[in-house]
Image (cartoon, rainbow, N blue to C red):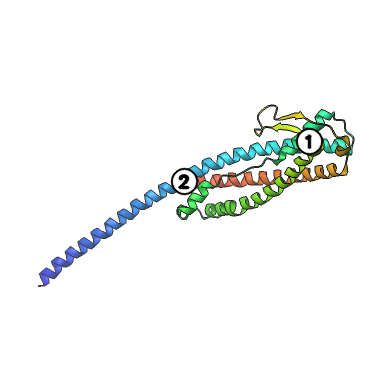
């Protein structure tokens, strides 16, 4: 009897250990698959971050051009610096182009959340900064963008109304002839008015604030990219 107990007990232990080993290897296989999925998603996120940084750089250049134009107009009005009517209207159009703003891509981050792959990220710092950028910083940026857009939509309406301004804008900072003024009727009274000067001061303030925000966002994207690269190398 004792012989059979030992025999069947040994067989049970062997079978039980076999099941545990099979489960262990299956779990290891699943972990490898999920980690590969996570790393692939992080690699895609790096590509998206690179694209967003390129977009941010482009808009920084465009906003800087708009700020330079607003400074020229400010000098022309406050200090009577000489500008021809054509140059005035060109620079007014350039200020109006500050309406164009950066729109981030959030699809890959949302995939990491919906698939629960974000839980597999090893770096707690990366996880924290991912949530902060996409759930806080970009939400705040979106609110500010809408505020800027509301201002510049009204600003451009005033240009159409008071100067009958018709113009075309290009949104690639590397292209030549980015601003094309097609038609206008110069309105000296409105240009020299307190209303226009007040709008110009507000435009300069908004452009400067947006430039600061874009530069801060770029630094956060670069930091996030570095953390993503480190995560894949682990």
Could one spot residue 122 in this view of the protein? no
Q: Give the residue furthest to the bottom.
A: 1
Tell me the SS state at disc 2: helix
170 horizontally vs 121: left or right: right
Question: Is the C-beta separation of discs 1 and 2 under 8 Å?
Answer: no
Q: Foreground residue, 13 or 111?
A: 111
Q: Position of residue 61 (x, y in %)?
A: 68, 36
- What residue sits right under mark 2 in the picture? 41
Q: Position of residue 160 (x, y in %)?
A: 77, 37
Q: Position of residue 42 (x, y in %)?
A: 48, 46
Which residue is at a point 50% across and 46% down the rendered structure image?
A: 230
137 horizontally vs 80: left or right: left
Residue at mark 1 to residue at mark 2: CA–CA distance: 44 Å
Q: Position of residue 206 (x, y in %)?
A: 75, 45
Which residue is at a point 87% across and 44% down the rendered structure image?
A: 194
* Screen quadrant of the N terminus: bottom left
Label 2: few (<14), some or many (≥20) within 10 Å?
some
Label 1: few (<14), some or many (≥20) within 10 Å?
many
Q: Earlier in the sequence, mark 1 or mark 2?
A: 2
Instruction: Say which quarter of the image contains residue 19.
Output: bottom left
The numbered disc on residue 129 is: none
Q: Foreground residue, 196 or 139?
A: 196
Could one spot residue 133 in this view of the protein? yes
Tell me the SS state at disc 1: helix
Residue 61 position (above or below residue 23): above
Q: Nearer the viewer, mark 1 or mark 2?
A: 1
Residue 178 position (above or below residue 140): above
2 horizontally vs 214: left or right: left
Which residue is at a point 54% across and 42% down the rendered structure image?
A: 48
- What residue sits right under mark 1 in the picture? 92
188 horizontally vs 231: left or right: right
């Amino acid at each position: 009897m004792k012989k059979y107990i030992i025999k069947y007990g040994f067989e049970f232990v062997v079978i039980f250990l076999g099941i545990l080993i099979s489960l262990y290897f299956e779990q290891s296989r699943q972990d490898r698959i999920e980690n590969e999925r996570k790393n692939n998603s992080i690699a895609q996120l790096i590509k998206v971050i690179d694209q967003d940084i390129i977009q941010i750089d482009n808009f920084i250049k465009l906003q800087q051009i708009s700020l330079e134009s607003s400074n020229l107009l400010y000098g022309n009005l406050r200090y009577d610096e000489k500008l021809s009517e054509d140059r005035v209207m060109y620079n007014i159009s350039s200020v109006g182009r500050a309406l164009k703003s950066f729109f981030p891509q959030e699809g890959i981050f949302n995939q990491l959340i919906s698939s629960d792959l974000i839980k597999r990220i090893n770096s707690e710092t990366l996880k924290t900064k991912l949530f902060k950028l996409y759930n806080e910083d970009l939400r705040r940026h979106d609110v500010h963008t809408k505020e800027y857009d509301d201002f510049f939509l009204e600003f451009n309406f005033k240009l159409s109304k008071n100067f009958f301004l018709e113009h075309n804008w290009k949104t690639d900072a590397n292209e030549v002839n980015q601003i094309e003024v097609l038609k206008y009727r110069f309105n000296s009274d409105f240009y020299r008015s307190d209303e226009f000067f007040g709008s110009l001061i507000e435009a300069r303030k908004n452009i400067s604030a947006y430039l600061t925000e874009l530069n801060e966002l770029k630094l956060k994207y670069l930091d996030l990219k570095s953390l993503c690269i480190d995560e894949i190398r682990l």
